[in-house]
Amino acid sequence: MTVRVELEGRLGSEPSVREVNGRDFVELSVAVSQGYWSKTEDRWVDQGTIWYRVHPTSRRAGEEARLLHKGDAVVVTGTQSVEEFTRRDGTNGYAIKVNADAIYVSRIPRKADA
């Protein structure tokens, strides 16, 4: 089964580009803030951040990813999967990966700009 997702978040670091067998592979780290507006408290209630590893799968998405910078707001659409990895301390961890077929620059204002 394929899980389609659309994420709206910010880049947590500069895009990572590495070459494998003569082909460039781009990886983005995208942070998505979780929370809700509390009417009773009249404020945003933060519920943490979820981090995604984003891998562009189309040529256009890869080209767009190269133009992005840390802190840029993006919208990503693609398929989601979970990868297991071993942490430095030997425990298991899980990473949420998105194979992105589209990456767009978003117009979310930075907190300092809002």
Image (cartoon, grey):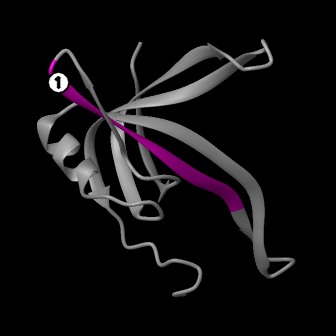
Give percent across and percent down for residue 104: 28, 56
Give percent across and percent down for residue 94: 64, 22
Say left or right for 113 vs 64: right
Say left or right for 112 vs 65: right
Q: Residue at x 79, y 14 (%)?
A: 91
Give percent across and percent down for residue 37: 71, 70
Say left or right for 89 vs 17: right
Q: Residue at x 38, y 58 (%)?
A: 74
- Name the foreground residue: 72 vs 18: 18
**Count of all numbered marks drawn on residues in the image:** 1
- Name the foreground residue: 43 vs 20: 20
**Residue at the farthest right position:** 41
Q: Residue at x 67, y 50 (%)?
A: 49
In the displayed structure, 93 sits above or below 60; it is above
Q: Residue at x 15, y 20 (%)?
A: 22
Residue 25 lies in the magenta stretch: yes
Looking at the rendering, which quadrant does residue 68 occupy?
bottom left
**Image quarter in which the N terminus is found:** top left
Element type where label 1 sits in the image: strand
- Name the foreground residue: 114 vs 85: 85
Q: Which residue is mark 1?
A: 23
Looking at the rendering, which quadrant does residue 114 occupy?
bottom right
Q: Amino acid at mark 1?
A: Arg
In the displayed structure, 71 sits above or below 17; it is below
Start-end of magenta stretch: 22-35
What secondary structure is the stretch in magenta mostly built from?
strand
Residue 65 lies in the magenta stretch: no
